[in-house]
Amino acid sequence: MTFEEVYRKYEHLTVELVNNEEIGPLEVAGAMMGQAMKLYKMTLSPEDFDSLMNIITHASGLDEERFIYDDMDINETKH
């Protein structure tokens, strides 16, 4: 299965859950974020996991056109 196929399956599940009137979009996002963090923690080295969490916790300073991190190699993929 390709990344695109996995992404589309999650997208479909997300839409299905959000359209359920008993579950709000924040609950869906929180559950998916929690699952993503578990997977990252299980598969990344402790250093890479901590680096990724650092990026996520500072994400409020991001704008969509520029991503600037002085301490990060922009050519290195963390996920």
Image: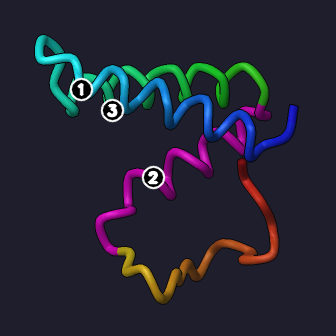
What is the span of residues highlighted in magenta in the rendered image?
A: 44-61
**Could you say whether the residue bearing mark 2 is in a helix, strand or loop?**
helix
Residue neighbourhood size for the residue with mark 2, other residues' Cα within 10 Å, grouped as few (<14), some (14–19), many (≥20):
few
Magenta span includes 51: yes
Q: Residue 19 got which mark?
A: 1
Q: Are marks 2 and 1 in contact (CB under 8 Å)?
A: no
Location of the N terminus by quadrant is top right
Q: Nearer the viewer, mark 3 or mark 2?
A: 3
Q: Is the magenta stretch mostly helix, strand or loop?
A: helix
**Residue displayed at 66% across by 30% down:** 40
Q: Mark 3 points at which residue?
A: 29
Task: State the CA–CA distance, disc 3 to disc 2.
Answer: 14 Å
Q: Which of 33 and 20 is in front in this view?
A: 20
Where is 2 relative to 16, above or below? Answer: below
Which residue extends farthest bottom? Answer: 65
Residue 23 as seen in the image, left or right of residue 72: left
Where is 77 relative to 45, above or below? Answer: below
Q: Which of 38 and 4 is in front in this view?
A: 4
**Could you say whether the residue bearing mark 3 is in a helix, strand or loop?**
helix
Where is 74 relative to 3, above or below? Answer: below
**What is the three-letter code of the residue carrying label 1?**
Asn
Residue 28 as seen in the image, left or right of residue 24: right
Choose top left, top right, bottom left or bottom right for residue 69. bottom right
Name the N-terminal-most of marks 2 and 1: 1
